[in-house]
């Protein structure tokens, strides 16, 4: 803890007593309070800390969010009644929560003291982890609600021996999912379990049964049922529009779901008998077997029909109108979950549009390859073009041949044909066709026609833009994971990052910089010209362009000494392949205000002027932001952009912004750099200090996330470096970047030379 128990009683200007306690802070000093008079100094009953001491300790931890209206005095009074060991446990938890959010820690002080009475020491760490998980996934309000209702957590502990959490079995379920046919469906946690056609949402824990085996089986049954919706065509009809045709859409959706569950269970029983037996066993344990004698003839007929093989969602729709008139309906199956037709439709529309354009682009390239191969294999003498050849080359196109296959949900598999002949289909096209078939039950005709028409460059751009690794929303927000070193796991999709256009400033800054550093610029030009040398002289070669004088003298000496002379007596020039891409990541946090900002801008001008000599591809982005919800990257120069007036104006317009959350920026720029075709890729960061942001992103947390992001970049073959002006950088840069991958400078003229040193080490 950051506090020493050294009390000192003093008087304020009005003669009132107050207490002064030395406490740790960056600048030293004391924490004073007039509110601590009265109350307990110690906990007499339990030998613990008193109210004043507890209040001080909590204030030291959550001081950032305290005010005249926000105090921890009442929680301290409540906490004073506990034993010392419990008080320490509570204070340690506050400190741990501060690493995630000081606001979360403050609310923990307010709402969680009663949890000490209910949660024993054995389960305490799990309780804290649960609060952190809820905060990360759902936000502060849900987390506060969980603190208030700690009794619900205690109740869940009574089921703990048999409870299975999704976290512990998600990898097994994903492997199980991969083994099933059709499109891969990711596993995600949700209070309501359903499928959006691209993922399966399952509850956080499975505790419905009295033993772990059944609870794990329950997870598998739920997952298979959601998978069956996508594999057996539940979403091939617009369910959202369908149910709106009824007077009561919610009731219509419920009945549709009951009917579909009957149909899907029958298909599962036919093709996955092992899972079907598990479903039957769980049904019996739940006493949920339906008594058909209570159902109307309409329902009985619907059930009998939907259990027949080869039924489709159209059969379900046919019976929906009939059973809608019946008052009594069978109960829901406990594993069927919910339907979310709106979300499913949005996912399908986005996917089908993307896949249609992607297929057209890929088929165009395949067509070109097939035509080229055909021309090479067809030998025709000049002037002897036959009618048969004209017919063969006149009208071409792709088509689909359906081949009977009982293992497929529609009873057939597809074969791609070109010019009415089967072709060997690349795997990526096979996967596209399979996904389209899964959505429609066929390959629509308009997916295959007019392959050679249209702007395929635009299609290619769209395909590329929609295939990036990060998740992009309609507002161009990229979501990235963040490493939480205290819990040794990623916070999924935690950082919201947006690319921002920097405001250009058209002034004389660039010209003034070039004039100011004209002598330095000449020296830099010579330095970078030396790096540009196209040839590298290789000595002691068996043959070459010139005689290697050193090798000849050494061979003569060997001969005189009675040794065999080497035959490698020549020098040879070898072309150096300069296939390099470099990404500059510029710190634009508020701490760069003043001379640091000017130095950064001047350094960028000198760098650009020098790099233009090399002809290498380079890009420049600035980074800043405020909390994980607003990470920002400022586009200064992209790889495809020339160093012209627009780029110069953006460099002039670089201004200090907010904070420096480095991890998200590194991950996004790594993605951009990874997409560039280059033999050598460099990521060079120019910063004035360590990672720092408002919501706990400082100290070990920020450093460890940045280090993890750099490791991810190295894994992709990218070489990260950092150039900083922070005198204390040795404390943390070696840990983040490695012993030789950073440099500390104190003047603008040193920066380009450091970059040339990096180039020389990596590329020559």
Image (tube, rainbow, N blue to C red):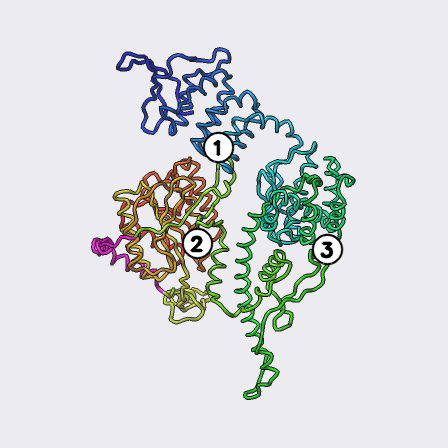
**Picture quarter with the C terminus:** bottom left
Q: Which residues are magenta?
A: 504-533
Q: In the orientation shown, which residue stands out farthest toward the bottom?
A: 383
x 38%, y 70%: residue: 547
Q: Earlier in the sequence, mark 2 or mark 1?
A: 1
Q: Secondary structure at mark 2?
A: helix
Question: x, y percentage for residue 421?
Answer: 64, 72
Residue 85 lies left or right of residue 285; in this view the side is left
* Residue highlighted by disc 1: 141
Question: x, y percentage for residue 320?
Answer: 67, 48
Q: How far is the residue under mark 2 from the one under mark 1?
A: 36 Å
Q: How far is the residue under mark 3 from the one under mark 1?
A: 48 Å
Q: Secondary structure at mark 3?
A: loop
Q: Looking at the image, which is closer to me, 144 or 762?
A: 144
Q: Earlier in the sequence, mark 3 or mark 2?
A: 3
Examine the structure image and report whether residue 486 is included in the region drawn in magenta. no
Quarter of the view holding residue 163: top right
* Residue highlighted by disc 3: 310
Quarter of the view holding residue 362: bottom right
The reply to whether residue 511 is visible in this rendering is yes
Q: Nearer the viewer, mark 2 or mark 1?
A: 1
Question: x, y percentage for residue 158?
Answer: 64, 27
Q: Nearer the viewer, mark 3 or mark 1?
A: 3
| Depicted 47 relative to depicted 301: above or below | above
| Depicted 464 relative to depicted 544: above or below | above
Q: Nearer the viewer, mark 3 or mark 2?
A: 3
* Residue highlighted by disc 2: 672
Q: Secondary structure at mark 1?
A: helix
Q: Point out which mark residue 233 bears.
A: none
Examine the structure image and report whether residue 528 is included in the region drawn in magenta. yes
Mark 1 crowdedness (10 Å alpha carbons): few <14, some 14-19, many ≥20: few
Mark 3 crowdedness (10 Å alpha carbons): few <14, some 14-19, many ≥20: some
């Amino acid at each position: 803890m950051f506090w020493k128990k050294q009390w000192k009683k003093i008087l304020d200007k009005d003669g009132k007593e107050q207490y002064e306690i030395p406490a740790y802070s960056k600048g030293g000093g004391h924490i004073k309070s007039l509110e601590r008079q009265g109350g307990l100094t110690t906990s007499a009953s339990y030998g613990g800390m008193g109210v004043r001491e507890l209040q001080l300790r909590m204030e030291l931890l959550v001081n950032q969010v305290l005010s005249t209206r926000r105090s921890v005095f009442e929680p301290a009074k409540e906490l004073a009644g506990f034993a010392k060991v419990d008080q320490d446990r509570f204070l340690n938890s506050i400190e741990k929560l501060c690493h995630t959010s000081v606001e979360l820690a403050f609310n923990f002080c307010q709402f969680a003291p009663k949890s000490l009475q209910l949660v024993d020491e054995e389960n305490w760490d799990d309780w804290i982890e649960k609060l952190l998980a809820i905060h990360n996934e759902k936000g502060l309000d849900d987390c506060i609600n969980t603190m208030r209702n700690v009794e619900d957590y205690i109740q869940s502990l009574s089921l703990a021996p048999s409870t299975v959490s999704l976290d512990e079995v998600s990898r097994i379920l994903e492997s199980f999912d991969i083994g099933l046919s059709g499109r891969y469906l990711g596993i995600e946690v949700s209070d309501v379990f359903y499928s959006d056609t691209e993922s399966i949402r399952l509850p956080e824990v499975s505790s419905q049964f009295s033993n772990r085996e059944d609870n794990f089986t329950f997870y598998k049954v739920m997952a298979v049922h959601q998978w069956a919706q996508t594999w057996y065509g539940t979403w091939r009809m617009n369910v959202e529009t369908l149910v709106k045709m009824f007077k009561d859409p919610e009731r219509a959706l419920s009945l549709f779901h009951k009917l579909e569950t009957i149909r899907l269970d029958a298909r599962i029983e036919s093709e996955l008998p092992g899972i079907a037996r598990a479903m039957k066993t769980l049904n019996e344990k739940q006493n949920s077997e339906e008594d058909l004698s209570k159902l109307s003839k309409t329902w009985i007929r619907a059930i009998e029909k939907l259990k027949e093989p080869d039924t489709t969602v159209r059969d379900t729709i046919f019976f929906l109108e009939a059973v809608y008139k019946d008052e009594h309906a069978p109960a829901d199956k406990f594993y069927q979950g919910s339907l979310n037709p709106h979300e499913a439709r949005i996912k399908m529309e986005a996917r089908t549009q993307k896949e249609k354009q992607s297929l057209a682009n890929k088929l165009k390239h395949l067509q070109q390859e097939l035509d080229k191969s055909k021309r090479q294999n067809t030998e025709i003498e000049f002037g002897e073009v036959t009618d048969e050849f004209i017919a063969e080359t006149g009208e071409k196109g792709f088509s689909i041949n359906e081949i009977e296959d009982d293992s497929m949900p529609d009873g057939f598999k597809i074969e791609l044909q070109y010019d009415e002949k089967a072709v060997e289909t690349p795997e990526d096209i096979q996967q596209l066709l399979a996904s389209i078939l899964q959505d429609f039950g066929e390959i629509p005709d308009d997916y295959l026609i007019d392959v050679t028409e249209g702007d395929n460059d635009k299609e290619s751009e769209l395909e590329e833009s929609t295939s990036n690794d990060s998740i992009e929303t309609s507002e161009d927000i990229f979501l990235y994971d963040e490493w939480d070193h205290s819990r040794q796991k990623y916070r999924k999709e935690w950082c919201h990052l947006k690319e921002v256009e920097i405001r250009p400033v058209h002034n004389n800054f660039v010209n003034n910089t070039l004039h100011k550093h004209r002598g330095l610029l000449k020296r830099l030009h010579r330095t970078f010209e030396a790096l540009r040398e196209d040839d590298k002289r290789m000595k002691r070669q068996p043959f070459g362009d010139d005689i290697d004088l050193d090798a000849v003298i050494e061979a003569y000496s060997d001969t005189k000494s009675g040794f065999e002379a080497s035959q490698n007596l020549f020098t040879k020039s070898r072309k150096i392949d300069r296939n390099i891409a470099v990404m500059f990541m510029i710190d634009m946090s508020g701490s760069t205000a003043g001379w640091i900002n000017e130095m950064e801008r001047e350094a960028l001008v000198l760098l650009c002027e020098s790099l233009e000599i090399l002809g290498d591809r380079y890009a420049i982005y600035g980074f800043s932001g405020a909390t994980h919800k607003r990470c920002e990257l400022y586009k200064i120069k992209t790889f495809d952009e020339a160093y012209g007036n627009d780029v110069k104006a953006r460099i002039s317009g670089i201004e200090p912004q907010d904070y420096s959350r480095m991890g998200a920026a590194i991950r996004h720029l790594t993605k951009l750099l990874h997409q560039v075709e280059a033999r050598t890729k460099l990521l060079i960061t120019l910063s004035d200090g360590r990672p720092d942001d408002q919501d706990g992103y400082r100290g070990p947390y920020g450093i460890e996330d940045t280090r993890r992001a750099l490791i991810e970049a190295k894994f992709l073959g990218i070489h990260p470096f950092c150039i900083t002006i922070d005198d204390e950088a040795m404390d943390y840069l070696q840990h983040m970047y490695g012993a030789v991958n950073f440099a500390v400078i104190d003047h603008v003229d040193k920066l380009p030379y450091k970059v040339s040193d990096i180039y020389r080490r990596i590329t020559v």
